[in-house]
Image (cartoon, grey):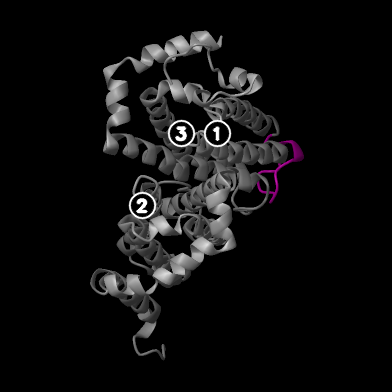
Amino acid sequence: MNEIIYNIVVWMDGFEWSTSLHESYYMYNWIESTHVLTLMVSLGMLFMIDLRMLGAAFPNVPATTLAHRLNLPMWIGFSAMIITGVLLVYAIPVRTSQSLWFRFKMVLLVCAAVNAYLLHKRMSESGASWENDAKAPKKIRISAALSLGFWTLIVISGRFIAYDWFDCEYGQSAVISFVAGCVDGQTQW
Amino acid sequence: MPTSILGPYTRTITAVVLVVFTVVFFYTVRVSVRASIEPLFDWMTASWFGIIGTTWGAAFAIVEALHLIGLALIGGTVIASDGRLLGLVLADQEPGVVVQKTYRIFNWALILTLSTGVFMACGVAGKIYFLKVFWYKMLALSAGMLFEYGIRRPLLEKDLEDITPWVIKLTATASIMVWFTVGALGRWIGYSG
C-alpha cells in the first residue's frame, strides 16, 4: 500500500506545476496563508455551533437555528480550506504523503467527518423540544465535545507537518517507517 | 445630558486619536524606540518561555496550534457578530443579542491568543525583533484591540435602532478586516526572516 501511494505521489511530483507551485515564494505562501486563515471562518463557525450545543455560547439563540444559519459560512470556509489543502499537498506531494502527522491528520479528519454526520443525525432525530434549552441533550453534547477535541488535534497535527522529526529522509525505526509510509530504496523525498 | 467635553462620542474619539497616534508614532519615531526596547527582546530570549520555546520544538508547535485555535475562535465570534450586523448570517436573530453573546468568547479567545503569542514571541524574540512584518502585526493588533474595546463595543452598547445603518455596517466591515489582517500578518511572520 505504501509503495502504491509513493508511486502516485512521485508521479504527481513530476508535474511542472507542482514544482512551480513549491518554488513560488508568494504563491505558495499565499495558499498556505489562505489555508490557515480559512480556519477563522470554518473552524470559527464550527466552534460557535459546538459551544452552543455545550451551553457555552448563545444560550438564548435556538440551537438548531444557529447550526443551520452558520452552516453556509462554515462550508464556504471548509471548501476554501480543502482546495488550498489539496494545492499544498500537490506542491510537496512526496514529503507530505510520508509525513506521520499528515497521515494522523487525515485519520482525524475522517473521525471528525463521521462525528459531524452523527451530530447532525442526532439533532434531526431529537426533534425541536430542546431547541431553546441552554444545553443540548447529552448525546449531542458528547458529539460537540468530540468535535472540539478532534479539531484541536487536527490543528495541532497540521502544525506538526512543518516539523521534520519523523521524515523518512532521516532514517526512522521500523514502526515509524511503516506508519509514515517510507519505502525501501526510495529516491525522492 | 453628557458632562464630557466631547459629548457622547468621547470614547470613540479618544480611541480614534489613539489609533492615529499609534500609526503616526510607528512611522515616525519607530527606529529610536525600537533600539531602546532591544534589551526587552534579549530578556524575552533568556526567559523560561524563551528557553522552552527554543529548546523544545514540540512545546513551541503545540503552543502555535493553540494560538491558531484562539485565532479561529476570534474569527468565529467576528463572523457571527459582524456578519449579523451586515445581515449576512443569523439574519432572523436580534442583532443586539448575537453581538452581546459573542463578547465573552471573544475576550477568552483574545486572552488565549495573546498568552500563546507572548510564549511564541519569547521563543523567537531574536528573530522577530528585526522583522518589519512582526511590527506591522503588533500595530494591527493594537489597532484591533483599541477598535474593539474603544469604538465597537461602546457604539454597539447603544440601541442599534438609534445608530445610522451605514455606521453599523462600516463598523462591522472594519472589525472583520482588522482581525483578518492580524491573522494574515501573523502567518506571514513565519515566512519572513
- The boundaries of the magenta stretch are A127-139
Question: What is the x, y in percent for residue B131?
Answer: 33, 56
* Vertical side of B46 occupied by A3: above or below: above
Measure how far apart labels 2 and 3 are at the Cα level: 21 Å
Residue B4 located within the stretch drawn in magenta: no
**Which of the two discs, 3 and 1, labels the residue nearer the N terminus?**
3
Measure how far apart labels 3 and 1 are at the Cα level: 28 Å
Question: What is the x, y in percent for residue B94?
Answer: 50, 56
Pointer 2 local density, CA inside 10 Å: few below 14, some 14–19, many at least 20: many
Nearest the viewer among A90 and B14 is A90
Q: Quadrant of residue B28?
A: bottom left
**Closer to the eye: label 2 or 1:** 1
Label 2 residue SS:
helix
The residue that disc 3 covers is A78
State the mark number for residue A165: 1
The kind of residue on which mark 3 rests is Phe
Q: Are marks 2 and 1 in contact (CB under 8 Å)?
A: no
